Amino acid sequence: MVEEPKAISRRDFLSGVTAAALMGAAAPQGAAAPQGAPAAVPQEPAAAPASDRKVRIGVVGGGFGASFQWHLDPNCIVEAVSDLRADRRALLQRVYKCEKPYESLEKLVLDPRVEAVAVFTGAPDHARHVLECFNRGKHVISAVPACLTLEEAAAMKEAREKTGLAYMMAETSYYRWPAILARQLWKEKRFGRFLYSEVEYYHNKICGQKDGLSWFEGRPTWRYGYPPMLYPTHSTCFHVGVTGERLTRVSCLGYGDDDPALADNAYKNPFCNHTALFATGGGNFCRCNVFWRVHGDGERAQWLGEKMSMYMDGASGQPFVIREMGKPDVKQLPDYFRLLPEPMRVPTGHGNSHSFLTHEFIAALVENRPPAVDLYEALAMTVPGIVALESSRRGGEQLVVPGFDKA
């Protein structure tokens, strides 16, 4: 069972510095901050491990799943690994120095020494695999998205609440450093009245006829013709994961080109690009893009308020900047590596987010509390995309996004 937190959580700790300390890494050591600017970030040491407990984890999926730092976390042991492909099982064994491979997730979850499972399988399998782990008494962290249908969302919520086991979604945007900082600014109400966000994820040429990731040994993979809004969380996390608000209504438009993948695919999906406009529970708006055809790449966001606005850097060339009434612009992020145990302060993909996700899941289990992106947050980021896809199929009709929060 995972209890609700009773004191300050690791989530709050990893949310980082106080916004009164924005200028952290921007000013040279010993230099005074510009007049009117926030003070320097205190260079606090990383917190010591909460205990000497070791969480024994099984890692499933030797593609993306090999890019995390389970073997570097002082409270974690990689007990077993699994992939359907022998080459990927071997890669997982090498990366995590693990001598116990299994040929499938279904076999790995039978191992009584495995306490938790990292599920990095194909997107259409996430909900099924998470439920299998729950049914075998295992805590779970899974790749994004959490699920592909509202029925799967309901089943995951029911299983999580019935078993009391922990679930976390490994959403990289949550621990991109601009998002960590924006979350802290939000908590300190520095934006004033929050008005609007723009959240974007661009992955050019994926999911098409000529995309290498969409084919394996002459057959289409799950990515072939995959709808953009069924992969929304790299974008929606920048709003939900910063503000904690829910996306409540959506109108979405889709764009399709002449790629053969859009004419015949398992999803009956004709769209390679989606743009959605969400209304939120906080009374503001979020414009969300997920594009597979665009001269651009990566994730980007901007958050606009009456007193402060923050702009994340991205492929467009727009630089990072915070603009606040009466203060000089802030143009450099703090260094957040100091919030991790020293062995985990390593460069990773997706804006150095991987080791933060790794450590947050393990810390949550050690501290017996829900992880930051728990099932309720994961569904709040995932479900809006499911409804947005349906809106695009109806020509942009505005639809209500159902909630899956704890009753």
Image (spheres, rainbow, N blue to C red):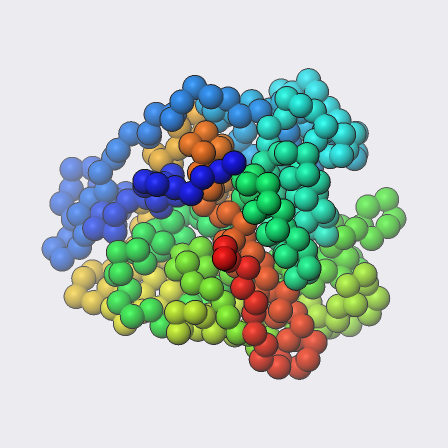
Q: Residue at x 58, y 58 (%)?
A: 382
Residue 319 can be seen, yes or no: no
Q: Residue at x 64, y 22 (%)?
A: 113
Give the image location of residue 206, x and y in percent: 69, 57
* Quadrant of res 368: top left
* Vertical order, 339 against 101 (above or below): below
The front one of 39 and 9 is 9
Q: State left or right for residue 105 relative to residue 65.
A: right
Give the image location of residue 353, x and y in percent: 48, 42
Give the image location of residue 135, x and y in percent: 68, 38
Q: Residue at x 28, y 44 (%)?
A: 17
* Quadrant of res 164: top right
* Vertical order, 378 against 326 (above or below): above
Q: State left or right for residue 300 relative to residue 191.
A: right
Q: State left or right for residue 114 relative to residue 304.
A: right
Total labels: the figure holds 0
The front one of 131 and 46 is 131
Q: Residue at x 18, y 62 (%)?
A: 327
Give the image location of residue 232, x and y in percent: 58, 60
Furthest residue to the right?
A: 218
